[in-house]
Image: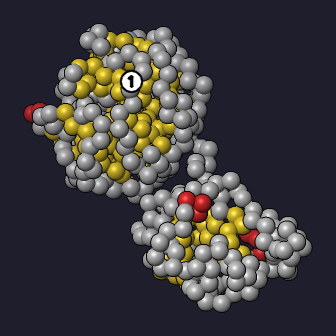
Amino acid sequence: MSGIIGSRLNVRGSGLVSKLGTDGQVLTSAGAGKQLAFGDVAGGVSWQAVETGSTMTAVAGNGYPIDTTSNACTITLPASASNGDQIVFTDYARNWGTNAITIDSNGLNYQGDDDTYTVEYTTDGQSVNIVYSGSTKGWIPIEDDTVTNVPVKGNDEGIFGFGTDGSVSSLTNLVSNAGVVATDVTGVGAARTGAAACEYGNDKGIFGFGRIDGGSVTGVTNLVSNAGVVATDTTGVGTARRLVAACSYGGDKGIFGFGYTDTKVSLTNLVSNAGVVATDTTGVGTARNSLAACEYGGDKGIFGFGEDASGNSSLTNLVSNVGVVATDTTGVGTARYYPGACRYGYDKGIFGFGTTGSRVGMTNLVSNAGVVATDVTAVGTARSGAAACEYGEDKGIFGFGNDGSYTAVSNLVSNAGVVATDTTGVGTARSTLAACSFN
């Protein structure tokens, strides 16, 4: 097969139903004369075991969950078909955006095109329901809904970790589903400052990078289980650096980006939904350090603020739901470095605190389209080097930092993005730490 059938196959998400019969009605297994809804078909097919192979042959009347976590999949349709034959494919692990499915129509037409065309579906979370309409149009998708967002759900608990109180630390502090910060948990892994953290696998987290004792930078990572338990060090992959930022994308994956080696960088490292960190991706956007990052839109991310070669920055860089970092977006809000950021309200984000040379407490909301708003007047103690994470599924918390001395004060963020006044600190006061959520 060669050529590409156009974007109508790849990006449609309208739930379009094609009318096939000469009388304007949709064909079903019983022939023309009945409107066919997706639920009718999904309930009538025989669902098979999850398919993980790189190739498979489909049989009419079956439904196939296709897991492309490890590889793309080429699906060969039956060599012959009868009007009303139906087959359903669904993205089992939301990975078609990374590893697509390709449909080989095996000598028959597909949506009116012969099998010299390549039919690809490349959107995470998509389901494709096809019916055979006859030799002219062949197989036609009667449903190819695009699910652009993961189910509306956030993580319930959070964790602050690492940082400095004058000496580098590996202490952690858990955050309950009510936003209560717990006392210190003895550190696991290399003590360091200037690390970052993000979620992966829907319910787990990862700390990575930073500066260890003696001033050396590292790429070491530490996984966080869905019970908030921090694992021992995983050998670093990618360029060792500090003062990085991280966020999740794609619903279940993560990305570390930017930072400082002995110079400012913009390279990134993707994190798989199994918590595996990839080698460096060439940087996009202005190199900088001491920035922050958070999720927005359910499956995308944003890096923002920091310090570039010219000084304080308010630039942002969007991250797509397949982990691609975009070029610079002109900054909105007060340029500053050492802010924190987290998600709130399921699909929105917030940057807060930092320093312009003087510590500040203002915040900037991020819409579910990734648009950063102008400054919101500061609430709580102005400070730099705070961290932030989600809790309670749809709320957030800023915690710790330096307000002239190390502090453990925290500020809750409501599911409407409203920052509360200070909550007395719990745990060892420190700054330039990291935080993420887990479930």
Question: Neighbour class for label 1 at 10 Å: few (<14), some, many (≥20)?
Answer: some
On screen, residue 358 above or below 373:
above
Query: Does residue 130 appear left or right of residue 316 in this picture?
Result: right
Residue positioned 62% across, 44% down in the render: 152
Residue positioned 45% across, 31% down in the render: 342
Expressed as whole percent of the image width and height from the top left, the position of residue 253 reads 43, 51
Residue positioned 51% across, 61% down in the render: 122
The answer to which quarter of the image holds residue 381 is top left
Expressed as whole percent of the image width and height from the top left, the position of residue 78 reads 62, 86
In this view, the residue farthest toward the bottom is 80
Say if residue 299 shows up in the picture.
yes
* Badge 1 element: loop
Say if residue 207 shows up in the picture.
no
Expressed as whole percent of the image width and height from the top left, the position of residue 85 reads 73, 81
User: What residue would you read off at disc 1?
Assistant: 331
Q: Amino acid at mark 1?
A: Gly
Query: Does residue 383 appear left or right of residue 119 in this picture?
Result: left
Residue positioned 75% across, 65% down in the render: 18
**Camera-nearest residue between 184 and 228:** 228
On screen, residue 357 above or below 57:
above
The answer to which quarter of the image holds residue 159 is top left
Expressed as whole percent of the image width and height from the top left, the position of residue 6 reads 55, 63
The answer to which quarter of the image holds residue 409 is top left
